[in-house]
Image (cartoon, rainbow, N blue to C red):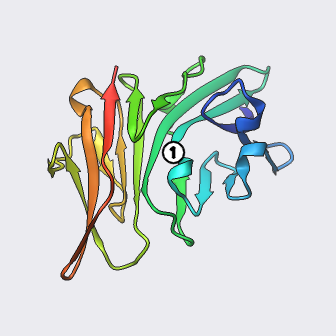
Amino acid sequence: MAQTLTWIKDDMTNPSNQIGTYTKSTRRFTFGPASQGRKFITPKGTLVIMNASREDTGNYTLAVTRTGNSVLYASVHLVVLGRRVPTSRLTLRLPPACFSTEPVTSNTAQEQKYTVQKNEKVAIKCVVREFGYSAYWFFQNQRLQLKDRMKLSNERLGLNIKGVKEEDAGKYYCKFIKRLSTKRTETLTLEVV
């Protein structure tokens, strides 16, 4: 049984990257240095990020400390495209199948190019500042054809890829369409190694 749930952004060895810890026995959330007052953990281990922006892009790891102090780890790469939306709320949930006994090393990021390991989970989020737009995903400059490992969020702003493969490597972006207006996010290049 889980005793504590701890979320960390990017480098797990740096204490200032700890977002926070939820302790089940006391039902208490303790903010970490990387929380910035916008990130918190629910009792079920979901990470909630308020007012998500590009600065929230990175590798997120959930460390679950169990009875006997054994630890399970699960990681997800999150990419936020677009600008901050004051009322946005982004949630990260990791299914039990994602967990391992070893932490995953963080990804590298350089100018909207992200490198991830095969078989990891990737979450990409598009953010639009206005409401009423329809979102469309593009891969390699063509409308994205969803594979069985891909899932869009209900509002179509989030793309989750489970078990990333080499064929998923390439350029991704979102287009937002509202009546006669079209907007587009910057391009994200995903590299799979």
Is residue 82 toward the left or the right of residue 181 in the image? right
Which quarter of the rendered picture does the N terminus lie within? top right
Left or right: residue 150 versus residue 121 is left
Which residue, as the protein is rendered here, is positioned at the far front? 111
- Residue 76, how many percent across, how many down? 49, 36
Quarter holding residue 191: top left
| Image point (52%, 39%), residue name | 58
Report the residue at 59% width, 17% height from top: 102
Q: Amino acid at mark 1?
A: Thr
Q: Which residue is mark 1?
A: 57
Q: Residue at horizontal 28%, vertical 57%?
A: 174
Residue count near mark 1 (Cα–Cα under 10 Å), binned few <14, some 14–19, many ≥20: many
> Image point 42% across, 44% down: which residue?
123
Image position, residue 64 (x, y; %): 68, 31
Q: Is residue 9 above or below residue 53?
A: above
Query: Would residue 37 be found to the left or right of residue 145 on screen?
Result: right
SS state under label 1:
loop
Viewer can see residue 21: no
| Furthest residue toward left | 142
Depth check, front residue: 103 or 192: 192
Residue 176: % across, % down: 27, 68
Name the one closer to the observer, 183 or 17: 183
Residue 166 image offset from top left, x and y in percent: 25, 24
38 or 6: nearer the eye? Answer: 38
Residue 173 appears in view: yes
